Image (cartoon, rainbow, N blue to C red):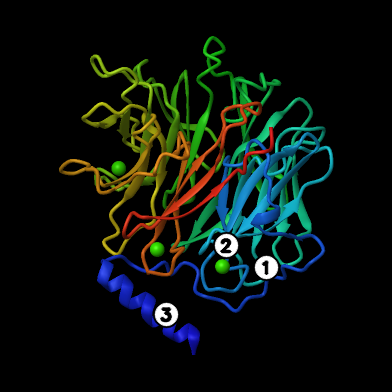
Amino acid sequence: MCSTVLQALAITASIASGQAPDQSHPHEAPRYDLTAPGFHASHLEEFDNGPAFGTCLAFLPDVDGDGARDLALGDPFRTEHLGRVVIASGRTGRILGWIEGPKDEPSFGRELAALEPTSGDGAKLLVARPRGAHPAIVSVDLHDYKQVDVWKAEAGETCFGAWFEPWHRVLEGERSVDGLVVISTMQTPDPDIGFYNEVPPPYRISRYDLEGRLQARNDWAGDPSAVNVPARATLVPTTEGDDVALVDSSGLYLLKGSDLTPRWTRRLEKKYFVRSMCSPGDLDGDGHADLVLGCPWVDLGTRREAGVVVLVSGARGEVIREIQMQGDCSEFGFAVCAAHALADNKPRYLVSRTSGFCEAVLEFRGSDPDPQEWWRLVDDNDLPHMGWRVYSAPDLDGDGATDVIAARASPSCWTLERQGFVAFSGKTQQRLYALERLPKNP
Ligand SMILES: [Ca+2]
Ligand SMILES: [Ca+2]
Ligand SMILES: [Ca+2]
């Protein structure tokens, strides 16, 4: 009865807000055992995370049975020898516990993705551990928290899985996960410059099937003179399956998902120093999904590092539009992400701005007549550089509208500032809760 009442409330709330409820994950009876041996149940009182907490998150099914989807949060450098993935309630932010990686594989949790449950298979969490003796991506079964499948790096490959995404095939209009696309690098990057955020050239992009077998591969030299402009990638949906967009200092590429050969390549103006990229759908109405590039360090007149967001045609790689923000704030475009579609099905995307005292997440819809700031989330500034990454969340607080999480991670393993995540209501733009690193005793 409770769940019927909750559903009725959620539907009423969604009608009131004009937003479609998140129906991608209908409420299921809880079947995730938080007392299984692989799960270390613990709460916030005991929680002391490592210096890279805030690096990444993934949205899980409802593991604690309260009706809202939950969160997996990367804590990849918990200690010198141990990485882990923290599981938290999506509704309240309360820490439920964690899953530990193997000893001496310290980067377990450096990047995360969720595999949706299918008819014959339960939900799984994909976890990258790109550093250490055996770089790999593993899948963790969310029923017993055991590691089941492994995609391994080959000899010489490092940063394996610093970026990866589940690759989708489209059959008869249905999208299903068919494998993984993984970026790795062919050299050991400088840990202070290149490890946390970056995949420096020369790098490699590979596609695997779900059993870990290699399906396609492409090696990229990149531009070795520009080590600070590493590869960024995103998947671009097509009617056949995902394509892969890749940007680095040499240019912008759209690779065919089937064999990773280029559909087109495009040189970008040098000023566009791309920090983030996403593909929210067709922005210019030509039937091809397009790209959004975040370039937070572009100067605008006397405004140093004001930042711009560039919309690029997925059909041919031409710039459709450049979005600039007025005012004195800087670093607009630090992170971008595609947002959940609403009932009107217009493409939406979120853009963060990370400069001090201006931290914000802004929502944009489509490209015509002009993309506009739809709403703005401003934290109370106790998490500097909030918006290091930004995520479109499912409905966390049960009001029927999708929500937003902004992450703040330290750029360096050695910076002991506060890091964490802030969840915002997508409906009221108010802060729901924060998950922060607790400062250690000096
Ligand atoms: Ca839950
Ligand atoms: Ca288009
Ligand atoms: Ca909500």
Percent x, y of residue 319: 29, 29
The image's mark for residue 121 is 1
Q: Residue at x 50, y 35 (%)?
A: 233
- Asked if residue 160 can be seen in this view, the reply is yes
Q: CA distance from mark 3 to mark 2?
A: 19 Å
Instruction: Identify which amino acid the numbered label 2 is placed on.
Output: Ser
Secondary structure beneath dot 1 equals loop
> Could you tell me if residue 244 is visible in this image?
no
- Report helix, strand or loop for mark 3: helix
Identify the residue position indicated by label 3 in the image: 7
Q: Residues within 10 Å of mark 3 (few under 14, many from 20)?
A: some
Amino acid bearing label 3: Gln
Mark 1 belongs to which amino acid?
Answer: Asp
Residue under label 2, please give it.
89
* Label 2: how many Cα within 10 Å (few below 14, some 14–19, many 20+): many
Quarter where residue 72 is shown = bottom right
Image quarter where ligand 1 lies = bottom right
Q: Is residue 53 above or below residue 92?
A: above
Quick one: which residue is furthest to the bottom in this view?
1
Is the residue indicated by label 2 positioned so its CB lies within 8 Å of ligand 1? yes
The crowd level at tag 1 (other Cα within 10 Å; few <14, some 14-19, many 20+) is few
